[in-house]
Image (cartoon, rainbow, N blue to C red):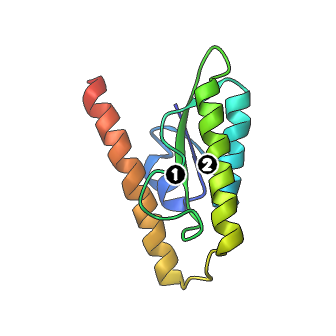
Amino acid sequence: MKIITNNSLVVKKFGDKYEVEYIEGDFLGILNVCRDYIHNKYKLLTHPLAGSIKPNETPYKTIMIDNVDDLDTDSLLLIEKAIDTTKKFQNNFRTPLWTDSVLEDFKVIDLDLITNVIETVNYYVK
């Protein structure tokens, strides 16, 4: 399992427990990196547009992926759709220049989303 993120709080919380790749980039950048991994035999473990925050509202995104034996076409189709959706949202309404306080709130929300997924996975794996 690998975690792809642009959220420093995710790195801080999970960097010593899981393989976490920190990307200097925006929401769309994370999706593009995940698409590249999918082309190299990874699959999505989390939905790329999970959460109730629109992709043009937050700059932070964390996605879990895992290595597989073959190209996962379902993951490829899903990430391509997420990229298209994100581009549409960003073309219509650019991400605002949020204050540092609001940016921290978005980091916490993204961290909470991935923490819940990891806790759920760990519960069912035990």
Could you tell me which residue is drawn at 67 percent across and 31 percent down?
Answer: 38
Frontmost residue, 19 versus 81 = 81
In the rendering, at what x and y percent does residue 46 appear?
Answer: 48, 40
Frontmost residue, 8 versus 40 = 40
Could you tell me which residue is drawn at 30 percent across and 24 percent down?
Answer: 125
Q: Examine the image and state in which quarter residue 25 appears.
A: bottom right
Under mark 1, the amino acid is: Leu
Image: 35 above or below 104: above
In the rendering, at what x and y percent does residue 34 appear?
Answer: 66, 41
Secondary structure of the residue carrying numbered label 2: helix
Badge 1: residue crowd in 10 Å (few <14, some 14–19, many ≥20): many
Badge 2: residue crowd in 10 Å (few <14, some 14–19, many ≥20): some
Could you tell me which residue is drawn at 73 percent across and 29 percent down?
Answer: 39
Image: 102 above or below 122: below
Most distant residue in the bottom direction: 99
- Contact? badges 1 and 2 (CB < 8 Å): yes
Q: Earlier in the sequence, mark 1 or mark 2?
A: 1
Q: Is residue 46 visible?
A: yes
Q: Quadrant of the C terminus?
A: top left
Frontmost residue, 44 versus 67 = 44
Most distant residue in the top direction: 69
Q: Is residue 30 visible?
A: no
Under mark 2, the amino acid is: Ala
Read off the residue under disc 2.
Answer: 82
Could you tell me which residue is drawn at 68 percent across and 21 percent down?
Answer: 71
Read off the residue under disc 1.
Answer: 49
In the rendering, at what x and y percent does residue 74 appear?
Answer: 59, 28
Secondary structure of the residue carrying numbered label 1: loop
